[in-house]
Image (cartoon, rainbow, N blue to C red):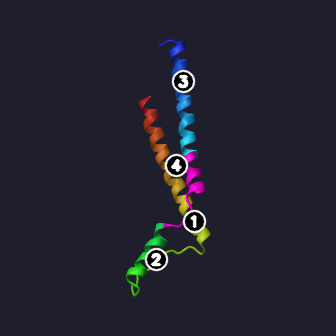
Amino acid sequence: MDNKEVTTSQSKNKQSNWWLIFAVISLTVLPLVFVEGEFSGADGEAEELINEIQPNYKPWFKPLFEPASGEIESLLFASQAALGAGVIGYIIGLYKGRNK
């Protein structure tokens, strides 16, 4: 492979990376702009639906740990998601590095 082909290949990779970054930012921002309504979790909606279908329903058990506030619950959820994304990214990078 000569230098011109390598340069062209690297240029295409950079362009692809910028398109991927643009797509990720678009997927993050566009729902915030165009979707109206309240963002809430599936747990709350499921609980609301269960109470609508069966008003006398009592849960079988209570959670072992209940955060003190909604903000702490959101923080724990975001931390869990970030940790999971880090592990997945590490594994993908590890396997990609092994192939080179």
Looking at the image, tell me whether mark 1 or mark 3 is earlier in sequence order. 3
Q: What type is the residue that disc 3 sits on?
A: Gln
| Residue denoted by label 4 | 86
Q: What secondary structure is found at the residue carrying circle 2? A: helix
Q: CA distance from mark 4 to mark 2?
A: 33 Å
Tell me the residue at 54%/34% (across/down): 17
In the depicted view, which residue is nearer to us: 21 or 75? 21
Q: Is residue 28 visible?
A: yes
Q: Residue at label 3? A: 10
| Marks 3 and 4, the one that precedes in the sequence | 3
Tag 4: residue type?
Gly
Furthest residue in direction top, as rendered: 2
Q: Pick whichever of labels 4 and 2 is earlier in the sequence.
A: 2
Q: Nearer the viewer, residue 64 or 49?
A: 49
Residue 20: percent from left, percent from top? 53, 38
Marks 1/3: CA–CA distance = 40 Å
Residue sitting at x 52%, y 56%:
81
